[in-house]
C-alpha cells in the first residue's frame, strides 16, 4: 500500500478485517500468543482475562475449561478488537454452535456441554481426522466412564506433562501427578486438552454404541486404531504397535 493510500484509509476510518483461527492450538497460552499477533488486545490483558475466575464466571467458565468457549474455525475481527469484545463475540459464536438439537443430545447422554467438550478433546487427541472412528472412540470412552474405569488416554498424559513432542508415552510418564492424567485420575479431567473441533463434539453427541473397552494404534502408524472388547485381544494389538515403534527407533 502506498503512503497516500494508507493516509486516505486512516482518514476515512476504514478497516479491513483480519482472519483468526484456532486450528492446531492446544493450550490457552498458545491462543493468547496467536491472538496478540492478530488483534490490538495485548498479551497481558488477554492473559489476565483467560485466568481470571471472576471475569470468566459471567460466561459460566473458569481457567480450566475456558478453552470450551472457542470452537475452532476461521473468524473475522477488526484489528482494534478489545478483550471484552473478543469474549462477547466468541460467546455469541459458542451459543450459535450449541443449537437446541445439540443441547438435547447432551442431555440425553447425561453430559453437560462442558463435559461433552472435555471428552471430545480426548477423542480428538486420539483421532484428529477420521470422523467415523471418532464416534467409535467416543463410545469406547463412554463405556469406560459407565464402568467407573480409568480412561487411560495417552494424549491426556502428554497434555499434563506439557511436552507435545512426545511420540511414545512411557510407563513412568503415566505416573505423572496431574488431574489431567487419566491414567491416575478417574473420570474426566477438569478441562479440555485442546481446542475442540465441532466434528469432535458431534462425534461424542452421536457416539457409536459398542462394547469396546480397549483401543490401540495400528502398527502401520496410519493414525487408525484397533478396538477390543477383552484385555487379551488388546494385548495382541498392543504388542504389534510396540514392535512397530521399536523397529522405527521411536522410544
Image (cartoon, rainbow, N blue to C red):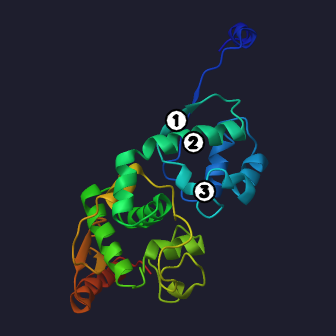
Q: Is residue 8 left or right of residue 239?
A: right
Q: Are marks 2 and 1 in contact (CB under 8 Å)?
A: yes
- Residue 11 can be seen, yes or no: yes
Using the image, tell me which numbered label, if any, was put on residue 75: 1
**Label 3 sits on residue:** 66
**Label 2 sits on residue:** 90
Name the residue at 38% across, 60% down: 107
Determine the secondary structure under disc 1.
Answer: strand
The correct choice, above or below, for 181 with respect to 110 in the image is: below
The correct choice, above or below, for 119 with respect to 70 in the image is: below
Q: In which image quadrant can residue 145 be found?
A: bottom left
Name the residue at 77% across, 47% down: 45
Given this view, does label 2 or label 1 mark the residue nearer the observer? 2
- Can you give x and y, in whole percent of width and height, for residue 141 in the image? 35, 74
CA gap, disc 2 and disc 1: 9 Å
Determine the secondary structure under disc 2.
Answer: helix
Q: Are marks 1 and 3 in contact (CB under 8 Å)?
A: no
In front of the other: 198 or 237 = 198
- Can you give x and y, in whole percent of width and height, for residue 203 in the image? 32, 58
Of the 4 image quadrants, the one containing the N terminus is top right
Name the residue at 22% across, 78% down: 211
Count residues near mark 1 (Cα–Cα under 10 Å), then give few for <14, some for 14-19, many for 20+. some
Of the 4 image quadrants, the one containing the C terminus is bottom left
Q: Earlier in the sequence, mark 2 or mark 3?
A: 3
Q: In which image quadrant can residue 244 be found?
A: bottom left
- Can you give x and y, in whole percent of width and height, for residue 175 in the image? 54, 88
Count residues near mark 2 (Cα–Cα under 10 Å), then give few for <14, some for 14-19, many for 20+. some
Name the residue at 62% across, 46% down: 34
Amino acid at each position: 500500500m502506498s503512503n497516500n493510500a494508507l493516509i486516505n484509509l486512516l482518514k476515512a476510518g476504514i478497516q479491513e478485517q483480519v482472519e483468526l483461527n484456532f486450528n492446531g492450538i492446544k493450550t490457552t497460552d498458545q491462543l493468547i500468543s496467536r491472538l496478540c499477533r492478530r488483534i490490538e488486545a495485548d498479551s497481558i490483558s488477554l492473559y489476565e482475562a483467560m485466568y481470571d475466575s471472576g471475569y470468566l464466571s459471567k460466561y459460566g467458565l473458569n481457567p480450566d475449561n475456558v478453552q470450551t468457549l472457542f470452537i475452532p474455525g476461521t473468524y473475522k475481527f477488526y484489528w482494534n478488537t478489545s478483550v471484552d469484545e473478543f469474549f462477547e463475540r466468541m460467546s455469541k459464536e459458542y451459543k450459535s454452535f450449541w443449537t437446541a438439537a445439540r443441547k438435547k443430545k447432551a442431555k440425553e447422554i447425561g453430559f453437560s456441554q462442558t463435559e461433552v467438550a472435555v471428552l471430545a478433546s480426548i477423542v480428538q487427541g486420539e483421532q484428529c481426522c477420521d470422523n467415523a472412528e471418532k464416534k467409535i472412540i467416543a463410545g469406547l470412552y463412554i463405556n469406560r466412564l459407565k464402568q467407573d474405569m480409568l480412561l487411560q488416554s495417552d494424549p491426556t498424559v502428554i497434555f499434563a506433562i506439557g511436552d507435545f513432542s512426545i511420540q511414545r508415552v512411557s510407563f513412568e510418564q503415566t505416573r505423572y501427578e496431574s488431574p489431567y492424567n487419566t491414567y491416575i485420575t478417574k473420570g474426566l479431567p477438569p478441562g479440555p486438552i485442546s481446542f475442540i473441533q465441532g466434528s469432535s463434539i458431534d462425534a461424542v453427541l452421536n457416539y457409536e454404541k459398542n462394547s469396546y473397552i480397549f483401543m490401540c494404534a495400528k502398527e502401520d502408524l496410519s493414525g487408525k486404531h484397533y478396538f477390543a472388547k477383552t484385555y487379551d485381544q488388546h494385548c495382541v494389538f498392543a504388542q504389534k504397535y510396540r514392535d512397530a515403534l521399536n523397529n522405527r527407533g521411536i522410544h
